[in-house]
Every structure is written in structure tokens, then in C-alpha cells.
Image (tube, coloured by chain):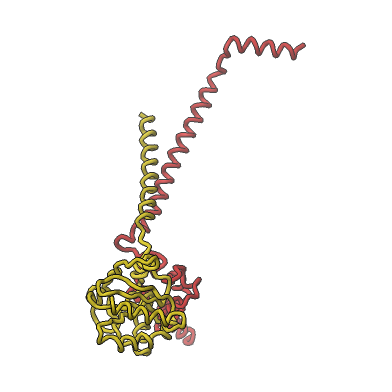
Chain colours: A red, B yellow
Amino acid sequence: MRLLLAIAITLALASPAAAACPTVADLEDELICPTCKTTLDQSDAPVARQIKAIVARRVEDCASKQQIKDELVADFGPSVLAAPPREGFHWLAWVLPPIGLLVAAGVISVLVWRWSRRSTAEVAADSNGPVPLDPDVERRLDRELARYDD
Amino acid sequence: MAGWLKLAAQVLALALVAGLFTLLVWKLATQDEGAAPKLGRGETPPAPAFRLDRLDQPGKLSLASYRGRPVIINFWASWCIPCKEEAPLLESVWKQYRNRGLVVLGVDINDVRSEARRFARKNGMSYPLAYDGPGETTTDYGLTGVPETFFVARNGRLVCDRLQAGVHLEANKDRFEECIQEVLAA
């Protein structure tokens, strides 16, 4: 019982630290190779290999993801990040797509509502009874039908 | 009323498309191809200015501060193998011609600062070194990779040639020497 308790306490103390340490894989798809402009996991360019080695070294030191990213941004600028940082002008990249989606959804909803309203109005118009035919057309129709009766 | 609204929406949509198209055309028309293609056509464009962190010591380094002196600008990176191979030749040129006013200026691009410093120390590069990690100068100069070497005359214009690949290579060696003489005489 005492042993189980000791294991539980050890795990509880160890897990937050372990969770704070990122892996190389965690970062490779969040960083861009500066020369080939693809994410690190898809690049084998010399500079990408260099950055991967640095990331691996910093992961070994248990540096946080943000720390590692900050260090790379200090050298390569924000373009080394696959996603733009949530600050200043870069906010636009985060805010504009959802706004665009909302506007598009709004426009589509209004159009669908209008179309459905028009259809209902047309159905209502139809339910008022048939529209009387032009007398000429009616006579012609009678003649045609009479031919089939014969 | 609804008709007017519809017309206004259509005009707005057309204006938006026309605006975006104009922006695209303007961007394509005014996009700078960089200095290298101009040099290749026999022009002598002004060397694009830059002000960068120094790699070899604290502070900034600007190209303008060398105005009036011939400058060889060598773009390099620590992960570039030919850059390592050509470094001794650039160092010897710097030592040989600096008393005639020639400056060899290394610009480290797309690189990790600490790795670049280690590279410079290891390869005995004593000439002035600037650091351009994000590679902002690459577009201005029209670089296609590293190493690349440019020659800036005393009047601040690019002259002679743009040497791609290592200056130590047989294919470049003679042209490198010719360009040194040309930039010293210009």
C-alpha cells in the first residue's frame, strides 16, 4: 500500500515536468525552413537540418515550445513560424478568415431564406386555382383534344 | 428599393474585384527583380543599401559606411559547404588588398547566429561580417543561393559580375581576380 502511494506521488510530481518538455516532432510542423519555405518535417535542406539539430538540443534541455520559437524568431524573424504570432498586424491572419466565413454564412442564409420565401409565395399563388387560359389557346387545345377523342 | 440595393451590391462586388486586379497588376509591374539580373544585362545598378547587426562584434554595419571604398560583398551561411571552402581565399584577398582600401564584407544569410559565429571563428574570417538571419537582403540583391559575391565600386554601384558558387572554384577564380582589379580601378 505504501509502495503504491509512493509511486502515485512520484508520478504526480513527475508528470507536469514531463508535459512541459516538448518533443522535436511537436515543433517540426510549426516551424518553416527559411530557404525552401516548407515546414521542417518536410524539408531536408541544410538550414532545415541545422534548425532541427538546434531544436533537438533545446528539447533535451527541456526548453518550452515558446522559448524555442522565440529563440528562432530572434534569428530568422517571424517568417520562421508556420502560423503567424497572435500580436499586432499578424492578428489579421487569425481574425479575417473566421470573419469571412461568418459573412459568407450570413449571405448564404439570407439568400436561402429569400429563395425559400419566394417558393412559398409561388406555391401559395398556385393554390389560388388555375390561371385562366387565353380563349384562342383554349379553343386550340379543345380542337387538339377532340382529335384524340375521335 | 430592393433593386437599388441589389445594384449597389453588384457595383460593390465589381469594384472589389477590379481593385484586387489593379493591386495584382501594380504589384507585378513594380516588383523589383533585384540587382543581380540588372548586373547580368550589363547595367551598373546601385548596390542595395542595408544596415544589419554585426556578427563579429556588437553594433550595426551599414553598406553606406563604406561609400568611397571598393567593397566585395560575399553572401554566405554556416550550413553552406562551398562557403567554407572559399573562406580562406576571401580572407587572403582581404589581407592582401585592404591597404589599398578594399573591403571584404561577409553577409551571413538564413542562418543561426551562434552557428555563424562558430563558423567564422573556425574558418579564421577576420573581415567585417554582418548578420541577416531572415535573409532580407536576398530579394534586393536577387540572390539564388549561397555563396554569391558582388563587387561595389567607390561610387556605390555594382560592377563587373555576380559570381555564383565559390570564388575559389576554377570556373570563378580568374573572373574573381578580374573583378577585384576592376573594382579597385573603378
Vertically, is B49 above or below A18?
A: above
Q: Nearer the viewer, residue A9 or A72?
A: A72
Which quadrant does the N terminus of chain B fall into? top left
Q: In this orientation, does residue A31 appear?
A: no
Q: Nearer the viewer, residue B59 or A118?
A: B59
Which quadrant does the C terminus of chain B fall into? bottom left
Q: Is residue B130 left or right of residue A115?
A: left
Q: Residue A77: image x %, image y %?
A: 34, 70
Q: Residue A13: image x %, image y %?
A: 41, 81
Q: Is residue A32 left or right of residue A71?
A: right
Vertically, is A117 above or below A78?
A: above
Q: Nearer the viewer, residue B146 or A2?
A: B146
Q: Residue at x 51, y 26 (%)?
A: A122
Q: Nearer the viewer, residue A148 or B44?
A: B44
The quadrant holding residue A6 is bottom left
Q: Residue at x 46, y 80 (%)?
A: B171
